[in-house]
Amino acid sequence: GAGVSQSPSNKVTEKGKDVELRCDPISGHTALYWYRQSLGQGLEFLIYFQGNSAPDKSGLPSDRFSAERTGGSVSTLTIQRTQQEDSAVYLCASSSKTGENYGYTFGSGTRLTVV
Amino acid sequence: GDSVTQMEGPVTLSEEAFLTINCTYTATGYPSLFWYVQYPGEGLQLLLKATKADDKGSNKGFEATYRKETTSFHLEKGSVQVSDSAVYFCALSSGGSNYKLTFGKGTLLTVNP
């Protein structure tokens, strides 16, 4: 597609429920990233996928968080047993090559509210 | 670890005013530095970047110079427009995980006509 697409754009869920957030990167981009933007905070790195390599999961805040990338394209971020502190905007980005010199293209994000 | 500190907003200016948004960083090695912009309702966009000391990144009238001696990357524009109203994020990447960006908290800029 023309840009990075994320769905849903907004999600309200009850505490304790599981949620799935979807990211559809730019076609042909091999690198995909998830970040979290909490109110008043900067963006927090969550996870990175590059091609068929093992993902860098070092930013996932707890074992309730997991992510998959199927077929080197679409990615799903899953949060199990959601807590109120999980409320944030979850941003996905993709890039054509690894590394800082190429920049990322970000999606518009999914705003998650846990009530 | 790596960190980015940028001036807290919100910043409110009149059209054609001069803009400075300060950004300083702490990083290992020689990071690459970035400014991203997020317009209302849109995703973050790369505004400009600099990959080594004394480089100047520029785009859309915005400039920032990589100052290693002061570990700074301040964003400037000589004459802002209403359309520049957005949130601006300073960021860096460094070290072995050079795909991983470390962001500041963002600065909200509002430009009034």
Image: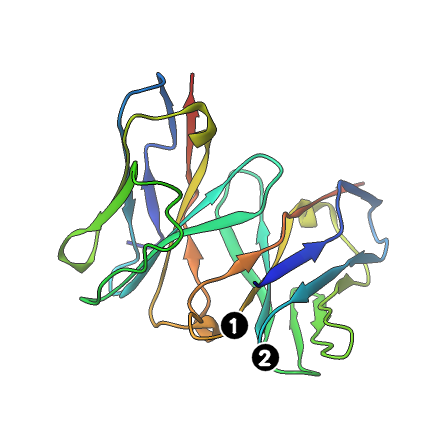
Residue lying at 77% horizontally and 59% vertically, measured from the top left: B22
Q: Are marks 2 and 1 on the same chain?
A: yes
Front position in the image: A62 or B54: A62
Image side of residue A83 versus residue A63, left or right: right
Give the chain of mark 2: B
* Quarter of image, res B57: bottom right
The answer to whether B57 appears left or right of B45 in the picture is right
The image quadrant of residue A78 is top left
Name the image quarter holding the C terminus of chain A: top left
Place residue A41 in its image quadrant. top right
Q: What percent of the width, then of the height, locates residue A101?
A: 47, 75
Asked if residue A75 can be seen in this view, the reply is no
The amino acid type, in three-letter code, at marker 1 is Ser
Could you tell me residue B31's position as x and y percent?
Answer: 57, 74
* Relative depth, front residue between A24 and A17: A17
Q: Residues within 10 Å of mark 2 (few under 14, many from 20)?
A: some
User: CB of mark 2 within 8 Å of CB of mark 1?
Assistant: yes
Real-space CA distance between mark 2 and mark 1, rounded to the nearest whole angstrom: 6 Å
Residue under mark 1: which chain is it in? B
Q: Earlier in the sequence, mark 2 or mark 1?
A: 2
Position of the N terminus of chain A, as image quadrant, is bottom left
Q: Position of residue B107 (x, y in %)?
A: 69, 47
Per the rendering, the mark at residue B30 is 2
Q: Considering the numbered disc 2 on the image, is that residue within a helix, a strand or a loop?
A: loop
Is disc 1 surrounded by few (<14), some (14 to 19) or many (20+) residues within 10 Å? many
As displayed, is residue B30 above or below residue A13? below
Q: Which residue is mark 1?
A: B94
In the image, residue A28 above or below residue B103: below
